[in-house]
Amino acid sequence: MEIVEFKVDNNFEAGDRLILDYNTNIDSTSTISYRSKTGTEKIIELSEFAKKHRVEIKDLDPFTVYYFVVWVRSGSLSFNTGQQMIATGGSKSLDENGYIKQCQDTSGKKNVFEKGVVSGGLYGGNYWYYGYLHDDLVDRCSGLKEKTEFYCDGNNVVREIIKCENGCVDGVCVENTDTKKEITSLADMVENAKRLQNNKLDEILSELKVFRDAVKEQANKKKYLEKLTKNVEKVSQNAEAALNNFITYGVDDNTKRLGEGERAAVIYSYKAAFNKLPETEEELADVIKIANGRWPSVTKQEAEKKAKGQFEKIYKKIADMNNPRDNAAITVMAYGLKQKAENRNLDSEKQGIKIFKNIYGFNPSTTEDWNSMQAITYSGASRGIDADGDLLTDEREKELGTDPKNSDTDGDGYKDGVEVANGYGPLKK
C-alpha cells in the first residue's frame, strides 16, 4: 500500500482533473482510493488488461488536501515518472498524445533582467507524484520591487519570487541607468496603449508634434482597416478607432517613423498570429511592443508551431529555443516583430528577399512571407553542418549527447530531430 498526500491550491480550478499514468502487473481487484480530510472516500478499481493505464479524477475542489491510497492486492504497480499531473482542458503543456511537452523558456534560463515566457514542462509539483499543466507562464511584477520569475529546471517549471533592488516594471527587474531607460520605454508603451484604448488621441498627437488629419484617417480606414476587419468577429467602434489611429499616426517616435504601411503590417501580423484583432489595452500594448521589436506579453502556440515549420524549411534544422538567434527567428516569424526604424538596412532586406525567393521560388507577398523575410534578414539564425540529415546540427548533437553520424541514435525508428521537435528524448527508446 502506498499513501500520497496532495494539496490542491489556487492553481487548480473546479472542473480540472488529476491524471495518473501507471504501469501494472496486477489483478483486477487493485484500487486507488481518495478522500479529503472531511469528505467521503471514493474508490477507483484498476484494470489488469493493459500495460499502461490512465485514471482521471474530475471532482476535486480547490484549496483542499486529499489523500490518495494505492492498494495493490497482488502483483506490482508503479507510476510513470514525470507524468502525474493536474491538467486543464486544452492545456498548451500537452502534446497531441496527452503527454507533457519539453519545458522551454524564451529567455533561455533564469534571468531577472528579461521578461521570459515558459511553455511546456510540469509546474508546481515534484519529480514523481504530481504537478500542474499550464498555459504559457509569463514573468511578471508581483510588487513595486518584486518579480515573479518562471524558468525551467530540466522538465520542471520553477516559480521564484525575486527582490528587485531598483524596482520592477513589466516583468523585468531594473538593473542600471541604461536598463531604467529601457524599462521606462516599456512603461511608455503600456501608457500609449491606454491612451489608444481610451481614445486620448490629442495626448498622443501632442507628444508626436503632429496635427490631426481627418482626411488621412478616412483614407487609411478604407485602405487598411476595412481589409483588416474582414473575416473576424465584429470589432467595437472604440477598437476600430484605436487601430485606425495607430495606423495613421503611430504612438511614439519609432512607430511614427515606420510609416502607415509598416504599422498596418504589425496589425496584420497580430491578426495572423492570434486569429483576432487587438481590442483590449493589453492587446494594444502587445501591438506597440511588436512594432518596437519587443516580444509580446502573450504568445500563441499555434503561431509558433507554424513558424517552426517555416524555420525548418529555411534553415534545414530544428529550432533550438534556447539559442537566442533561433528564438528570435521564431518570434519574428510568429508575431512579426519589427526592426526599429533607425536600425533598418534596406540593402540587407533586398538580400533577404533574394534568399527568400531562392528557398520558396517566389517573392514574399503575404504577412507570413514578409515576417519570414524579416527573420532571414535580422535574426542572425543560420544553417549548420548536419552530417546525418536528422535536422539537428552536429554542434547541437554534441550538446544533446546524440550521435552526429546516426540519424536515429536510440534505434527506436524515429529520427533524433523528430524526437527533439516533439519533446521526446532522442536517447531513450
Image: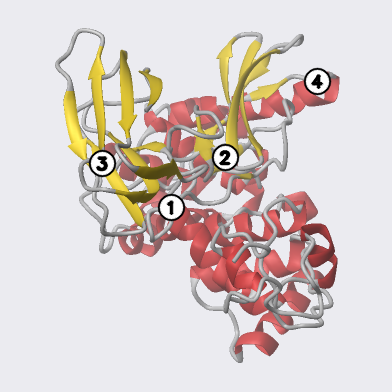
> Where, by quadrant of the figure, is residue 382 drawn?
bottom right
| Badge 4 or badge 2: first in the primary sequence | 2
Which disc, if any, is residue 321? Answer: none
Q: Position of residue 365 (x, y in %)?
A: 52, 78
| Secondary structure beneath label 1 | loop
| Badge 4 or badge 1: first in the primary sequence | 1
Which disc, if any, is residue 56? Answer: 3
Mark 4 → mark 3, Cα distance in angstroms = 46 Å
| Secondary structure beneath label 2 | strand
- Residue at x 52% of width, y 34% of height: 128
Q: Nearer the viewer, mark 4 or mark 1?
A: 1
> Where, by quadrant of the figure, is residue 363 drawn?
bottom right
Between 326 and 58, the residue placed more toward the observer is: 58
Q: In the rendered image, which residue does mark 2 sit on?
A: 118
Mark 4 → mark 2, Cα distance in angstroms = 22 Å
Q: Position of residue 38 (x, y in %)?
A: 20, 7
Q: Nearer the viewer, mark 1 or mark 2?
A: 1
Q: On the picture, is 77 further left or further right than 171?
A: left
Q: Nearer the viewer, mark 4 or mark 3?
A: 3
| Secondary structure beneath label 4 | loop
Q: In the rendered image, which residue does mark 4 sit on?
A: 175
| Badge 3 or badge 1: first in the primary sequence | 3
Mark 3 → mark 2, Cα distance in angstroms = 26 Å
Q: On the picture, is 341 further left or further right than 56?
A: right
Instruction: Indicate the amino acid at tag 4.
Output: Glu
